[in-house]
């Protein structure tokens, strides 16, 4: 028995079925060295964060009274007991950075997931409802975008009060408009295509159309935006922590660590240098990944 | 063109109304009684409380309160700071030039360094120059600028002692504020060395604030240049035998700059977010530091008025960029 499909496929008359989205993402990673490097860095840091209690040489809040402001191990006066030195009350900086990864990555993930979910919901509603609902949602998003992101976050924290959760909530609200706009734009493009009409004619209800027909085809730009959103979430959370409006001490959050190190900048460069370096590395890794994914997934840029 | 102008302007109006609503709601969303917030920690006696309530109009219906608020805003009355007792608008106007001066320098630096890097990287695509500058610009783009500012201080001010750590000018000089721009004012004053001092205070904050726009501009210029360089008319120009630099600078750059201009315009919001952090670190007496302090002091009228003013400035600049873009590129004027 012959397989007519395979034959037609070989002749190029019908195309092979598109690969599963996960396969496509994996291929994107293989295509781009930068994205792959970013992924590896993030996985390593995520592992360190997950097993922070075993990986970190010291508990993050433990104060060693014999070691205030000790320099890193390779500097004169440093000790291998504290590889990256200690802060002003004798806490091990390396351990605090490792535990800080846990704070940053988990809060960042929470922010991106919630902003993405709310954004998809609002974006799909705007695209499907059109009319007044659409105008209302999109105008609201415009207003939210009129304020510079950090200022918007600061206003929200000023209302709610400074804490890590409130800062995370503020960053979710700041990121929301991007996801809503992107989802709406992608959904509108898809809605004009024949397969959606076919599905509608076949009797698919609006919910099925929204979630099963249209949404999967809108995912590529959303995945890219979510990756880049992760990096800006971590940056904004650290900035808020630095300004005293995010995580409060003694939480080992990178931005908060920096702000409490400020007064020692002249005497102890290491308390300022390493937490910031940690932020830079994580943000850079997410941006590398986002850039690589965009080149590979975004059909508009596919050349 | 008129129709294009009118539609763009009319699109801004609902957003502006929304921002006034946000700023109006701000003080009312803060948990607790606004008057007790205004009175601070010392508390307030009930008679004065009631009097203030009536004076501020807080006893009227919300809609009426909003109407009164809008009227005040349109007359330039944005309330009075709790801490300094000065009108918010007046404080904003004294501090705003400092932020503009810093931002202009930052964007100038970003353009002066970013454009040539982007062009060169596109022309020498695939070279070590291309790879290293694009790698660096990704690092710049990912930079937590509050940390970057600290590193700059640590290296140039603390280690080398080249530049001052904070402020706009050395305390040795007293410069009459004429324009509010320290560089111009210091030139106008008779004090010798004042201009040098002002300039040296400006360098590090400009680098810190300009880094992200620089990275964005370099990347954008490169990709937009690459796109233009592959167009047919560039091949024609080359085939005509024009000098390579002429093709790049005269023919390609002109078209490649259009998307770059938009990106520069869009950087205004980013620049302001950065100014909040940069000004706080360098003790730069601008609007960003003022807003942060208002949050720390719980000076809600300042935060309320400041948010409205900043949003208005950002919206105005975006509108101007939009209109200019329509002027430069007739294709988007429908």
Image (spheres, helix red, strand yellow):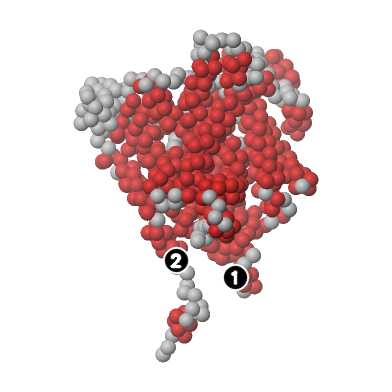
Q: Picture quarter containing residue A284?
A: top left
In this rendering, do the residues under marks 2 and 1 share a single chain? yes
Left or right of A209: which side holds A6?
A: left
Residue depicted at x 57% and y 57%: B240
Helix, strand or loop status at disc 2? loop
**Image position, residue B73 (x, y; %):** 73, 28
Tell me if mark 2 has few (under 14), some (14-19) or many (20+) residues whose alpha carbon lies within 10 angstroms of its own. Answer: few
Helix, strand or loop status at disc 1? helix
In the rendered image, is residue A41 in sight?
yes
Residue to which mark 2 is pinned = A20
**Image position, residue B121 (x, y; %):** 46, 47
* Front-most of residues A186 and B6: B6
Left or right of A169: which side holds B15?
A: right
Q: Picture quarter containing residue A50?
A: top left
**Image position, residue B254 (x, y; %):** 60, 47
| Subunit of label 2 | A
Tell me if mark 1 has few (under 14), some (14-19) or many (20+) residues whose alpha carbon lies within 10 angstroms of its own. Answer: few
In the figure, A171 relative to A17: above or below?
Answer: above
Q: Residue furthest right?
A: B2
In the figure, A208 relative to B109: above or below?
Answer: below
| Subunit of label 1 | A
* Front-most of residues B160 and A114: B160
Q: Point out the tag, 2 or 1, that comes first from the N-terminus.
A: 2
Q: Residue furthest bottom?
A: A1
Residue depicted at x 30% and y 40%: A52
* Front-most of residues A138 and A189: A189
In the rendered image, is residue A112 in sight?
no
Residue depicted at x 37% and y 28%: A272
Residue depicted at x 63% and y 31%: B310
Which labelled disc corresponds to residue A195? 1
Left or right of B2: which side holds B261?
A: left
Q: CA distance from mark 2 to mark 1?
A: 18 Å
């Amino acid at each position: 028995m012959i397989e007519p499909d395979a034959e037609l496929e070989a002749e190029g008359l019908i195309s092979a079925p598109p690969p599963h989205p996960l396969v496509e993402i994996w291929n994107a990673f293989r295509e781009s060295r930068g994205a792959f490097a970013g992924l590896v860095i993030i996985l390593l840091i995520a592992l360190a964060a997950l097993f922070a209690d075993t990986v970190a040489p010291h508990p993050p809040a433990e104060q060693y009274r014999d070691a205030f402001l000790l320099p890193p191990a390779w500097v004169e006066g440093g000790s291998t007991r504290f590889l990256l030195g200690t802060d002003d009350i004798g806490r091990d900086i390396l351990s605090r950075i490792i535990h800080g990864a846990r704070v940053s990555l988990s809060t960042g993930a929470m922010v991106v997931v919630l902003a993405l979910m709310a954004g998809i919901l609002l974006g799909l509603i705007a695209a499907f409802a059109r009319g007044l609902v659409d105008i209302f949602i999109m105008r609201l998003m415009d207003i939210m975008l009129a304020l510079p992101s950090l200022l918007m976050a600061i206003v929200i924290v000023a209302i709610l009060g400074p804490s890590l959760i409130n800062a995370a909530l503020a960053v979710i609200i700041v990121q929301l408009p991007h996801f809503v706009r992107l989802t709406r734009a992608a959904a509108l493009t898809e809605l004009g295509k024949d397969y959606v009409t076919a599905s509608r004619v076949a009797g698919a209800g609006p919910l099925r159309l929204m979630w099963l027909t249209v949404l999967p085809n809108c995912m590529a730009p959303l995945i890219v935006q979510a990756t880049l959103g992760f990096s800006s979430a971590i940056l904004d959370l650290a900035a808020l922590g630095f300004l005293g409006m995010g995580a409060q001490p003694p939480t080992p959050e990178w931005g908060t660590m920096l702000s409490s190190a400020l007064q020692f900048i002249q005497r102890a460069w290491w308390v300022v240098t390493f937490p910031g370096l940690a932020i830079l590395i994580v943000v850079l890794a997410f941006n590398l990944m986002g850039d690589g994914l965009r080149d590979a997934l975004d059909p508009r840029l596919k050349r | 063109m008129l129709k294009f102008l009118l539609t763009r302007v009319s699109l801004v109006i609902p957003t502006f109304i929304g921002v006034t609503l946000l700023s109006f709601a701000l003080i009312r969303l803060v948990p607790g009684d606004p008057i007790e917030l205004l009175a601070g920690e010392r508390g307030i006696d009930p008679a004065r409380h009631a009097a203030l309530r009536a004076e501020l109009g807080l006893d009227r219906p919300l809609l009426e309160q909003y109407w009164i608020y809008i009227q005040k805003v349109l007359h330039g009355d944005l309330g009075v700071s709790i801490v300094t007792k000065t009108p918010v608008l007046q404080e904003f106007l004294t501090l705003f030039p400092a932020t503009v001066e810093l931002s202009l320098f930052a964007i100038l630096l970003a353009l002066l360094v970013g454009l040539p890097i982007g062009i060169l990287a596109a022309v020498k695509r695939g070279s070590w120059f291309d790879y290293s500058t694009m790698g660096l610009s990704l690092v710049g783009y990912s930079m937590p600028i509050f940390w970057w500012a600290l590193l700059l201080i640590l290296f140039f001010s603390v280690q080398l002692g080249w530049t001052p750590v904070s402020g706009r000018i050395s305390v040795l000089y007293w410069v009459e504020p004429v324009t509010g721009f320290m560089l111009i004012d210091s030139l106008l004053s008779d004090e010798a060395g004042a201009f040098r001092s002002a300039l040296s205070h400006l360098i590090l904050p400009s680098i810190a604030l300009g880094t992200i726009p620089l990275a964005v501009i370099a990347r954008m210029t490169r990709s937009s240049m690459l796109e233009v360089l592959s167009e047919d008319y560039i091949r024609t120009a080359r085939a005509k035998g024009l000098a390579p630099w002429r093709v790049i600078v005269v023919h390609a750059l002109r078209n490649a700059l259009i998307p770059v201009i938009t990106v520069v315009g869009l950087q205004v919001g980013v620049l302001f977010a950065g100014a909040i952090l940069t000004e706080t670190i360098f003790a730069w007496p601008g609007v960003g530091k003022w807003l942060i302090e208002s949050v720390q002091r719980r000076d809600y009228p300042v935060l309320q008025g400041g948010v409205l003013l900043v949003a208005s400035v950002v919206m105005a600049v975006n509108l101007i960029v939009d209109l200019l873009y329509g002027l430069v590129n007739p294709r988007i004027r429908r």
